[in-house]
Image: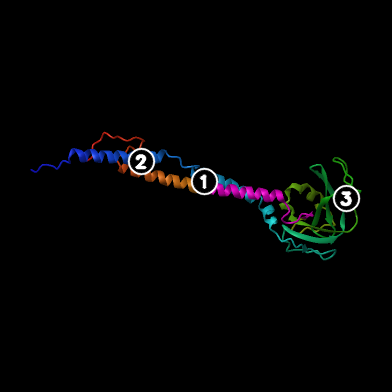
Amino acid sequence: MSDATVPPPDEVDTLRLEREARIAQLEARERSPRGPGVHPLMSLMGLAVLGFLLWQDRLDLAYLFASRTPVTLGQEGTYPREGLTPNRYVQLHGRPTTRASFGQVEGRTVVMVGVEGSPFVVRRSALPGETWQPGEPPPAPNPAAFSVRGRLLREDQDPRFAQGYEALRSSPQLHPIDGKLYGIVESERPGTDRGSAAWAALLVSLMAFNLWLLVRGLEIRVRRRRLAAQWVEAGGDVGGGSDGGDSAR
């Protein structure tokens, strides 16, 4: 029976020192700062919330980039009866209905008045002579014919003013399309809502940051798994310590 080959003491010490140095290097890399990073699930949740907020404001965001050339919706007797595309910049000429709905928004009187013989309701500021206070019966709107330019919205896209649409729905002078009235927000041009533009820019920036955090978090998790595997190969304790007293084999 032959004797097993035993390395010389100097070689054993060298191997042990090399292993301890390798483990110390891995431990130092594990403790070294890696910059900001969050769990990937948290980043995904943030992206979902921001995406939902963008989806809620999709109409306002889309209108920012709509054409600034108004689409003509006609005049008395020539209003369309179908095929209306909402959330566009439009113009028309017409006569007001004899009944209007009045309300206040941020201390300002707002009038919703129909366009006779059409499905359209114009939302505008009060004109001279249309004096109204909350709790009082609404006065008759200014009877003069008018031209208007503004943003076209289907009534279900304008829920903040649902009460005004309901107040005018029964007017025989209006002709809804498929049971829906269409509002025209006077003077609202595409690309002029700076609040929506700033909000969209903020949401997109936050989404980009969360996407970066997601990629960063995944990279950190992959790096940690690789370090753990290298640590085990070097003879270190995966739980966080190294044992330099073991002899190399």
Q: Is residue 162 above or below residue 92?
A: above
- How many angstroms separate mark 2 from mark 3 (CA)? 78 Å
Q: Position of residue 135 (x, y in %)?
A: 85, 40
- Residue identified by numbered label 1: 213
Magenta range? 183-212
From the viewer's perspective, is the residue at label 2 or at label 1 nearer? 2
The amino acid type, in three-letter code, at marker 1 is: Leu
From the viewer's perspective, is the residue at label 1 or at label 3 nearer? 1
Residue lying furthest left? 1
- Residue identified by numbered label 3: 127
The colour mode here is rainbow
Q: Element type at marker 3? A: loop
- How many angstroms separate mark 2 from mark 1 (CA)? 27 Å
Q: Position of residue 221 (x, y in %)?
A: 43, 44
Q: Element type at marker 2? A: helix
Specify which label sits upstream in the sequence, 2 or 3: 2
* Residue nearest the observer in this picture, 169 or 72: 72
Q: Residues within 10 Å of mark 2 (few under 14, many from 20)?
A: few
- Residue identified by numbered label 2: 25
